[in-house]
Image (cartoon, rainbow, N blue to C red):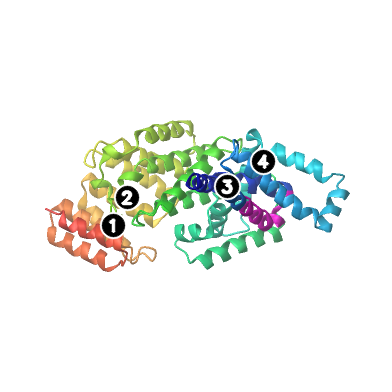
Amino acid sequence: MSQSANQLVEHFFRHESAKLIAVLTRAFGIRRIDLIDDMVQVAMLEAMNSWKLNGIPPNPSAWIHLAAKNRILDTLRREKNFAKAVSLSGQTLASQELVIDQWLEDEHIADSLLRMMFVCCHPVNDRKTQIALTLKALCGFGLSEIARGLLLPTETAKKRIQRAKKSLADANVGLDLPSVEQLDQRLDVVHDVLYLMFNEGYSTSRGIDPIRSDICEEAARLCHLLCQSSCSSPATKALLALMLFHASRFEARTDDQGAVIQLEDQCRSHWDRHLIESAQGWLAQSRTGRPTTYHLEATIAMLHCGAPSIEKTDWNSITTLYSRLLELHNSPMYAFNQAISIGEAGDTHEALSRLKELKVHPKMKGYFLLDCAIARIYVLQGDRKNAVDSYLLAQSQTAVVHEQAFIEGKIKSMP
């Protein structure tokens, strides 16, 4: 029973704390988010202790909701300023409690979560801070998990979240949904945060720590919530499609030791066909006259997921799609991936020329995967010596064990 209770509390901390923080912050304002966060954590600890002794209640979600609500109301009742403010508003604590109970009902929770999503992604904070706050407030991650997931010292993650809360409080940010005039701009920020958040979890060579996949799952969950709201746009649906296409290949990307498996070496039978079909459905719903970068990236991911092998991939179409992406955003990563697609399509000399040009780009210096890509092109040319030299150069640029293992495996597998 004790083990079962611990597992359930951990599950609810992830999936229920977001609901509680969203609803209680909506009720009592962003200035009280620290108090709300503390009370939610206390409620989780109360649940753990109580359920160990008395067993898991029939409705554990309602139990935790009630515990957290009572905790914060008891604290606020002792605050004279709060009691005075409530009185001046013509309300009572009892009437406010009824509102909270209503917002905690299943049909109203999504609305509070959506409001909180726009708060966490408010432009008053920078992107990295927005991601950290989203993981804390909307995904139920603890400080150590956030630090591990974002590859930060715990104290840095803590300060980043504290800074985010203070900035929001100082700006007196409300939990109203953006106006029609503001929606497009605010939605772009939310998309950007969810995209970067997913990439934090999906980044290659980060090992098999489950926190990485958890970040991806939470980003996709929040994007799905956004897709089901009136605030969504075609870009929202394309972003969800992109996440699901990538998530379908998650299990095939690392081996049992955590070493990265590149696309050309992945076992495609391990790709999740259900997720691929779901992604195709969302991409179909996202069709628009003005495709965004999410549409184009999702279409590229769909071509990869639909190809039976690396050789039978439609590399010419992928190259064209990267040209369109570069027109929208001149990113060195788009140029990098386009050069690879050109090489896989057969023009290895052009691919090699483009990849070598990228080596002097400020954002690509020391990027070990660039030399791995150059090695791959040499392999396609049948030039084993230069391929090995490029892999060894890539190996010298990283001290990460999993990255070292990946490169060692590539060298050993060369004909």
Distance Cα–Cα, label 1 vs label 3? 65 Å
**Residue 195 picture location, percent across and down:** 48, 49
* Of the image marks 2 and 3, the number of the one nearer the N terminus: 3
**Which amino acid, by three-letter code, is at mark 3?**
Leu
**Residue 273 picture location, percent across and down:** 34, 34
Secondary structure mostly seen in magenta is: helix
What residue sits right under mark 2 in the picture? 338
Distance Cα–Cα, label 4 vs label 3? 51 Å
* Of the image marks 2 and 4, the number of the one nearer the N terminus: 4
The label nearer to you, 1 versus 3, is 3
Distance Cα–Cα, label 1 vs label 2? 9 Å
What residue sits right under mark 3 in the picture? 53
Distance Cα–Cα, label 4 vs label 1? 44 Å
What residue sits right under mark 1 in the picture? 354
**Which amino acid, by three-letter code, is at mark 2?**
Gln
Task: Confirm or deny contact between disc 1 and disc 2 (CB under 8 A).
Answer: yes
Which residue occupies 41% across, 41% down?
298
Q: Secondary structure at mark 1?
A: helix
Q: Secondary structure at mark 2?
A: helix
